[in-house]
Amino acid sequence: MNKKICLVTGAGGSIGRAMTNIFAKYNFIVVATDINMSGIHEKDNIFKYHLDVTNTKEIESVFDNIKNNFSVVDVLVNCAGILRSKPFENLSVEEWNQTISINLTGSFAVSRRVYEHMMNNHGGVIINISSDAGEIGSTMSSADYSASKAGVIALTKCIAREGAKYGIRSNAIAPGFVDTEMLKKFEDYWGKEKLEETVASIPLKRMAKPSEVARLAYFLASDDAAYITGATFDINGGSCMN
Ligand SMILES: NC(=O)c1ccc[n+]([C@@H]2O[C@H](COP(=O)([O-])OP(=O)(O)OC[C@H]3O[C@@H](n4cnc5c(N)ncnc54)[C@H](O)[C@@H]3O)[C@@H](O)[C@H]2O)c1
């Protein structure tokens, strides 16, 4: 099989769908996975599978399917995630654990399985979707979210360091505000006005489009980025400058 394979988690969401579309457009076979199957639109080279990233049995079964029906995974994009907006004093340990388990442990578990594939084959690229909240903490999302996304950045660096000898590269993308369903959570909690005020304070005066985040991921997966690994790329319209 000549076409490269890209596995996307959280592919039923706004950014995951944009990832699926760009990799499919550039001739990848995309294995698009989510717990929300209705968000994935299957077509020629897009195949959808149910995958809850917290379920190790399901990860194994998706990998068996990939092995049997396609080939090895060349690119993994870890997009699955949840966001919560809650004051610190109201955040429960259960809520904390749930977010860490999906956003961080889920990214680890899928990466760990893909890494093995890549290690035994020809290398590959792992792209993790973090957030500016993981770099600076967030005043709008809660601590569980920021901590999970900081963990994703550290996970990315570890994969990059250890994977380099096998030809595996890994980079993180840290978006600011992206115009997606997820942001409705902010609006529900903080109100429309506060969200508009925050967007107005962004130097580029708008949110990112999901396709802009996807284009960055596509670049990072390409050979043009062959010397880039262990890095975190901000895409936030200037709202957070490191
Ligand atoms: N929207 C933003 O402004 C923004 C900013 C920074 C980072 N991000 C990150 O980008 C990624 C995509 O977010 P989005 O904005 O497209 O949100 P979204 O809510 O549209 O998509 C997230 C997807 O993850 C899926 N998901 C949730 N739990 C899952 C699980 N256990 N297993 C598998 N899939 C699961 C959901 O079903 C959903 O389809 C997330 O990791 C998010 O944290 C988003």
Image (cartoon, rainbow, N blue to C red):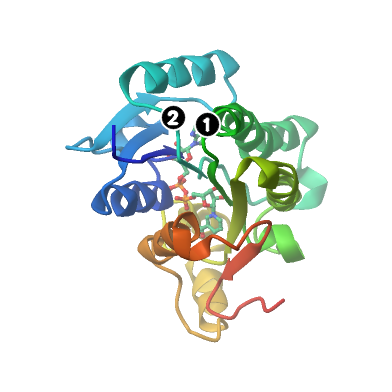
Q: Amino acid at mark 2?
A: Val
Residue 112 location, x and y as percent?
Answer: 64, 30
Q: Which residue occupies the extreme left position in the image?
A: 44
Residue 236 location, x and y as percent?
Answer: 55, 72
Q: Amino acid at mark 1?
A: Asn
Task: Look at the image and tell me in which quarter the C terminus lies.
Answer: bottom right
Residue at 58% x, 81% y is 238
Give the SS element for disc 1: loop
Evaluate if marks 2 and 1 touch, with contact meaning CB atoms under 8 Å apart. Answer: yes
Residue at 36% x, 33% y is 31
Give the SS element for disc 2: loop
Counting residues from the N terminus, which is met first, the one under dot 2 or under dot 1? 2
So how many labels did they put on this image? 2
- Quadrant of residue 38 within the rendered picture: top left
Q: Which residue is mark 1?
A: 121
Q: CA distance from mark 2 to mark 1?
A: 8 Å
Residue at 76% x, 42% y is 91
Q: Which residue is mark 2?
A: 72
Circle 2 Cα neighbour tier, 10 Å, few/some/many (<14 / 14–19 / ≥20): many
- Quadrant of residue 173 within the rendered picture: bottom right
